Amino acid sequence: MLFLILLLLESNVPRDSAIGTKPPANTYSFSESSEQNLANVHPDLVSLARKALELSPINFGVSEGARSFDRQKYLLGQRATQTLDSRHMPADPIGGGNGLAHAIDIFPFVGGEARYDGRLFAEIKEAWDQASVLLKIPFEWGGDWKDFHDAPHFQLPLDEYPPDKALEK
């Protein structure tokens, strides 16, 4: 009888759930367009995005990184943002800034197309949480904002990454 119970218990255990094994890593990588959108973005945010993509169960791309003042003004007029003081806009090096954007917007990429589904963003955000712990790089997610829910938006915190902070070499 004990043998039968053990056999039944063993048959309900998935073969890939052995102790110490990890699920296979995904094979996602950023497209050329996403890579271009990461240009002029703070390297810590780029590292965080890359690690999150590596850990994410859902593929995602970068729809926007550094943004001009004119683009920000346009988005404000479209009510796609609530500020002209965006972390997407690189801090002007002439004025003492580091010349880098501190925010990106992403999109889930499922079945060969961009999908703007809140559940997908939430799953991707979990991968960002894991990446943040591993890399010890903090971030803020627009999906957590109360006044203006912005699920595609990820940024470095202003208090730890002011626009005039020089990059460490």
Image: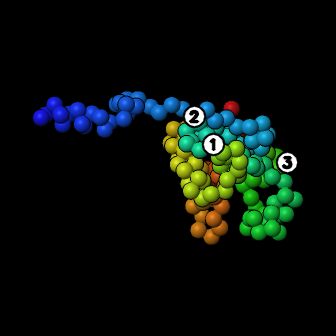
- In-front residue for pair 110/48: 110
- Sequence-wise, the earlier of marks 1 and 2 is 2
Closer to us: mark 1 or mark 3? 1
Look at the image and tell me in which quarter the N terminus lies. Answer: top left
x%, y% of residue 128?
56, 46
Q: In this orientation, does residue 42 appear?
A: yes
> Would you name the residue on which mark 3 appears?
94
**Mark number displayed over residue 125:** none
| Amino acid carrying mark 3 in the image | Ile
Would residue 162 be found to the left or right of residue 90 on screen? left
Residue drawn at point x = 70 percent, y = 37 percent: 30
- Give the color scheme: rainbow, by chain, secondary structure or one colour: rainbow
Residue drawn at point x = 56 percent, y = 42 percent: 56
**Mark number displayed over residue 26:** 2
Q: Secondary structure at mark 2?
A: loop
Residue drawn at point x = 81 percent, y = 52 percent: 67
Q: In this orientation, does residue 103 appear?
A: no
CA–CA distance in space, label 3 to label 2: 42 Å
Residue drawn at point x = 51 percent, y = 43 percent: 130
* Number of marks in the rendered image: 3
**Mark number displayed over residue 59:** 1
CA–CA distance in space, label 1 to label 2: 9 Å
CA–CA distance in space, label 1 to label 3: 37 Å
- Sequence-wise, the earlier of marks 3 and 2 is 2
| Amino acid carrying mark 1 in the image | Asn
- Sequence-wise, the earlier of marks 1 and 3 is 1
When asked about the image quadrant of residue 167, the answer is top right
